[in-house]
Amino acid sequence: MHAGHADPGCADFRWPDGDGREIPYAVFTSPAIFEREQARIYRGPTWHFLALDDEISTPSAFKSTFIGTTPVVVTRTRDGDIAGWINRCAHRGALVCRTARGTASKHRCVYHQWTYDERGHLRGVPFQKGLDGKAGMPSDFTPGEHDLTPVRIACHRGLVFGTLADDAPDLETYIGPEMLPWVDRIFHKPVVYLGCTRQYAYSNWKLYFENVKDPYHASLLHLFHTTFNIYRSNMLGRSIVDSRHGLHALITTTPRGDAETAGTYRDQGIATYQSGLALVDPSLLETRTELAEQTSNNIHTLFPSTVIQQIQNTLAVRQVLPKCAGEFELVFHFFGYADDDAALRRQRLKQANLAGPAGYISLEDTTATELVQRAIESCADGAHSYMAMGDETQDQASSLITEHMIRSFWRGYRAIMGWA
Amino acid sequence: MDDITLYFHIERLFAAYCACLDEDRLEAWPELFTADGSYTMISRENHAHGHPIPLLWLDGRGMLEDRIHALRNASIYEAHRYRHAQSGVQVIDRDDDEVRVASSYIVVQTRGEGFSEVYQAGSYYDRIAIDGDTMRFRERLVVYDTARIKTLLATPV
């Protein structure tokens, strides 16, 4: 929180009336609101993408990651299933696992060498019986009562999710009947993990969630998109929200011919349309048809930390990891299909140039969220944004000039945060 | 070519490379590569585990030129300046028309607010084509240690 700006805290925070078009900037800067999110959202009944199944495909393979700010580990067990636990020693609270990924059948805390198995069960306490008959743990010490805190794990078609809440619904119910077919469209056959990229943004995680629910900006901020006909707002589009709570949403675009869509941009003189710009090597954008409907963009947000991305032939799951009110990490997990031929796999690696921290059509996003964060760090109480594009009374599901998905996100957020 | 001459030519190529990026002469950068030369930037994490996804993979001078063209005309990012420091140049292998070289780099970035900070650190693994007195990159593989890219990466390192 910037000095001089009253932290609204939470007890006396009043959400403004309205449909979600006016969002108080305090939700992006307040440490108190950030802590409330960790409790109500991240430790609440939500599911979080943790890994692709293929990332931890071999026995005892593990990965360290986070649910919100809580460190967790997911690991393949010797039995072949996947276990998860909070990465915090039951003894004194130290991080047990200190590497991003690897293979280990035992996890030993370095502080006092308490040792756990893949399921997080406590298997060893040095000097449990003391030394020379002196000291040691009390006689009623029961190792099974001091396991690592388990994380509930659920897998769906090669995706591994976790939740910290016992009362979360099952994963498929959480994703819901409107959104699940779109997940299954991308995960329609076995996938292989190809690697990740990581970037750190100095802005609030919800500014990124607004961004990925915002087709309005896509053709205006990202010139590369527009110029090379990957994305234009007059393409065939979808903008669908989960009608139960508005928190999950899908954007897709499906190209039409270049001549058909270029005219509008040229005629309106939109700055991001430069008809003279052409790639010296257009092989970057050669796209193999591999989906029944070959969308050019498929950006699918699953609240609160998961974005499934298909841009041309790049496939990725983006993981949004909040760090504090003004910072988040963004991890792109790239994947292909197990049956990719060599040429298609090579094209996926080439089109990795489009996405991630250096990607032609993604590098602007953190620029934009940081521009917002820098301007709102210090502002008058009650200062707010204004997002009214696209009228809810019209059909919004096929429009790309709309902010209805952002507004529905904020209505759902307000409910889950308990600001009725 | 004797060792001293070889190192002289390598150092001269490296100095030209750093100057292109540090002095905003980006259009000259692709010319330091052979026509079929490639530039790949990949994290140490992916490289060590055999995961092939690059941060950037520019295969051939056309893609190198396109990156610069996009930076100049398309991409939106904060104005910034790099300062490269390169050290530990080791010749790994050589024959008549190619030398393989490994080295370390640090890139300090300065953005509009005026702070300078270490933005990138890592290794260069190069295959350098020798054509008489001229050396060009046939392959520059950048394996970066700084796994978490701060905000974004626009200009190649």
Image: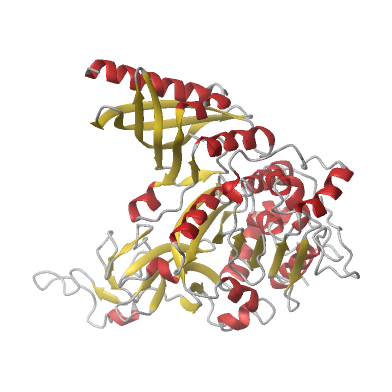
Q: Quadrant of residue A24?
A: bottom right
Left or right of B3? Residue A36 is right
Relative to the observer, which residue lies in front, A23 or B107? Answer: B107
Residue at figure coordinates x 51%, y 77% from the top left: A157
Residue A76 can be seen, yes or no: yes
Residue A88 can be seen, yes or no: no
Residue at figure coordinates x 39%, y 64% from the top left: A63
Left or right of B47? Residue A142 is left
Left or right of A157? Residue A133 is left
Please tell me whether residue A67 is drawn above or below residue B56 in the rendered image.
Answer: below
Q: Residue B31's spot in the image, x, y percent?
A: 50, 26
Please tell me whether residue A203 is drawn above or below residue A253 in the rendered image.
Answer: above
Q: Residue B7's spot in the image, x, y percent?
A: 29, 20
Residue at figure coordinates x 8%, y 70% from the top left: A132
Q: Residue furthest left?
A: A132
- Structure colour scheme: secondary structure
Please tell me whether residue A301 is drawn above or below residue B117 in the rendered image.
Answer: below
Q: Residue A309's spot in the image, x, y percent?
A: 60, 62
Relative to the observer, which residue lies in front, B141 or A34? Answer: B141
Relative to the observer, which residue lies in front, A199 or A25? Answer: A199
Q: Quadrant of residue A148?
A: bottom left
Quadrant (top left/top right/bottom left/bottom right) for the C terminus of chain A = bottom right
Number of callouts in the render? Answer: 0
Residue at figure coordinates x 51%, y 56% from the top left: A348
Please tell me whether residue B55 is drawn above or below residue B117 in the rendered image.
Answer: below
